[in-house]
Image (cartoon, grey):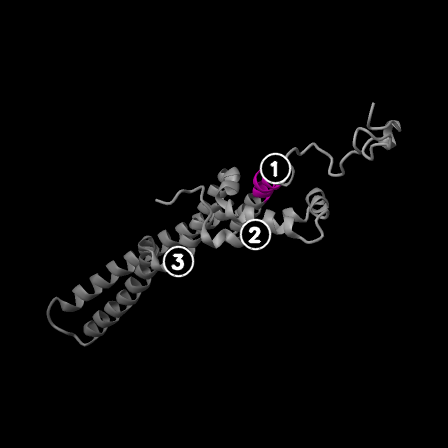
Amino acid sequence: MADPSRLRPDDRADFEAVLHHALGTADIRGALGTDPAGRAAAHLRAHALAHADDIAAAAEGPYRSYLAVRRAARHEARGPLDSGSLLPALAVLTPLVAGTSAAALLLTGGLLHLADALGPLPGSLVAAGWTLALVAALTGLGTLAALLHTALRKRGVPPASEQVEHARLVWRQELLDRGMLPHLRRHLLPHPDTAITPCSPPDTLSPCPARAREDRTPCSD
């Protein structure tokens, strides 16, 4: 069985979309802007793609939920191809077949009675026709009750496609917040709290760009 935390091949496009969005956030874009050649951005992107499974593992819970909802929706969409759909099909076909057969038997038995046919055949046909009519009525009522129960149960429940899309968006947001952005920031700067613009060397008296607006004191003591 495949590791549920590993990224599926058909979800790579979503991963790359989240990566593209993360690279465009203000702090990461500003830090990468210090490299006009774009080599830092390309290296960061390649590193994230190479560690896709590690990044995706940070959002394993929402990813599991997304896979479960998507699997259920695909199973439901297959419908008639599944063996579990045999019972609903029989529930729909039984009253139709029983009703048609009952009408045919009643008609044939009635015609034989009108023709003064001898023997028990006319009576047997009529009796069988009424039996099938009763079966058709009972199965028809059962099917109607099942349809009403299903409709009431599903009322207010969003369609499967909407559930899948919602689970997908939740996973992508968690992937961005808990996996992608922390990974990029961790590998963008050795110390995330360090300012992107370095301070002046300590042997000069020029003010520190990061503090000049606050205290107007030089970086060196």
Q: Is residue 174 magenta?
A: yes
Disc 3 marks which amino acid?
Arg
Mark 2 → mark 3, Cα distance in angstroms: 29 Å
- Asked whether, in this view, residue 117 is left or right of residue 111, the answer is left
Callout 1 amino acid = Arg
User: Looking at the image, is mark 2 or mark 1 earlier in the sequence?
Assistant: 2
Identified at 28% across, 62% down, the residue is 98
Q: Position of residue 191 (x, y in %)?
A: 65, 33
Magenta region, residue range = 173-184
Horizontal side, residue 221 vs residue 170: left or right: right
Bin the neighbour count of mark 3 within 10 Å (Cα to Cα): few under 14, some 14-19, many 20 and up: few
Disc sitting over residue 16 in the figure: 2
Instruction: Identify the residue position indicated by label 1 in the image.
Output: 186
Query: Could you tell me if the residues under marks 3 and 1 are in contact, i.e. CB atoms within 8 Å?
Result: no
Identify the residue under disc 3: 78
Please name whichever residue, 93 or 22, is drawn nearer the observer in this view of the structure. 22
- Residue at 19% of width from left, 73% of height from top? 112
Q: Is residue 182 left or right of residue 73?
A: right
Looking at the image, which is closer to me, 41 or 27? 41
Q: Earlier in the sequence, mark 3 or mark 1?
A: 3
Q: Does residue 62 appear in the picture of this structure? A: no
Q: Secondary structure at mark 3?
A: helix
Residue lying at the far top of the rendered structure: 221
Dot 1: what SS? Answer: helix
Residue 184, horizontal then vertical, whole percent: 61, 42
From the top left corner, tell me how far across and down residue 187 is, in percent: 60, 40
Question: Please, what is the dominant secondary structure of the magenta stretch?
Answer: helix
Image vertical order of residue 100 relative to residue 166, above or below: below
Q: Residue shown at 63%/35% (left/top)?
A: 190
Q: Is residue 194 above or below residue 141?
A: above
